[in-house]
Image (spheres, rainbow, N blue to C red):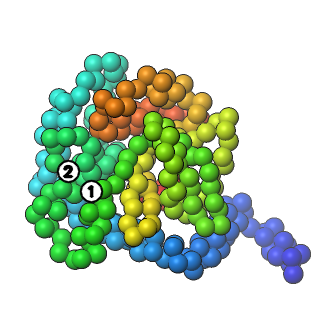
Amino acid sequence: MDDVLERILANFSEEDRARLFFNARQYQLNRKAHIKKYNKFRKLQSEVIDSMENYILDGKYDINKYLKDMTSKVNFDKLKDKRFFNFDYDDPDDRTILDELFIYKNIEGIPSVTEIYLEKNKLRNEDKVKMLNAMNNSYVSLFKIVGVDREDAYVIYEDVFTKKRYKIIDIAMSGSVVIDKKRPIYYYNRIITIDGISYGTGIHCIMTGDNKELINFIKKHDYKKSPDFYRCLMLYAISKKEENMEVSYNNRYGYR
């Protein structure tokens, strides 16, 4: 039987074989209870995000005004290149950053869309309100990938600044990431926890340990005095210059 399978696979392209194994793994994982819950919550969050993005695009939340207000609160004088303030909502990378900056709480004194939705009772569905609260209580930071459980699709994050570890579900990353202590992977991401399920929102901001600008930022960064807004923009600017790693996303909230 194995010989027959090998002969069949020999006729497949490398891409087709990869897709075949990915789908087989996905099928096995989708039968597990914690993955069923995870899929449910990801779908639920996607529906909430769609509503919020429409709210923004309809002009009910003035991104330009709030971006100006945010930047006025933070000292970016040391930046040599301020072009990363020019965002394109149609660009998938920029869009995850804009969603991150404005949908979630990133700086005091500026309301997030999540806070506005909760305050104005924009969503009445019980599950979606529960998701809103989970989003409002979520946690964002720069993490180093330190472990992986391929069988159950878990990835272990270590917060670079607090050293606290988090175990999250990430189907795509858990199936492809390689833990290399000499060349660790760093990921600026937001963790949502709901009903015992934790997962990342999938911000497009990922780097490798041989990125000298990243390592220099980590060494000099004043974590306690800097808001998440500052960290997000600085690390996104660094990640856009990443030359040592190719990253693709299987949707706007996932990595592979």
Measured as percent of width and height from the top left, residue 49 is found at: 29, 62
Residue named by callout 2: 112
**Measuring 61% from the left and 67% from the top, which residue is drawn there?**
152
The amino acid pointed to by label 1 is Asn
- Closer to the camera in the image, 21 or 100: 100
**Measuring 37% from the left and 26% from the top, which residue is drawn there?**
222
**Measuring 46% from the left and 70% from the top, which residue is drawn there?**
38
Q: Give the crowd class for mark 2: few <14, some 14-19, many >=20 residues within 10 Å.
A: many
Element at badge 2? loop
Measured as percent of width and height from the top left, residue 124 is found at: 17, 75
The amino acid pointed to by label 2 is Ser
**Measuring 28% from the left and 24% from the top, which residue is drawn there?**
76
Measured as percent of width and height from the top left, residue 36 is found at: 49, 76
Residue named by callout 1: 136
- Where is residue 64, by image quadrant? top left
Locate the C terminus by quadrant: bottom right
Q: How many marks?
A: 2
Q: Is residue 143 above or below residue 238?
A: below
* Observer able to see residue 240: no
- Closer to the camera in the image, 138 or 31: 138
Q: Which mark is residue 190?
A: none
Element at badge 1? helix
In this picture, residue 121 sits left or right of residue 244: left
Q: Is residue 229 above or below residue 99?
A: above
Query: Given contact means CB atoms under 8 Å apart, are the residues at marks 2 and 1 in contact?
Result: yes
In this picture, residue 125 sits left or right of residue 163: left
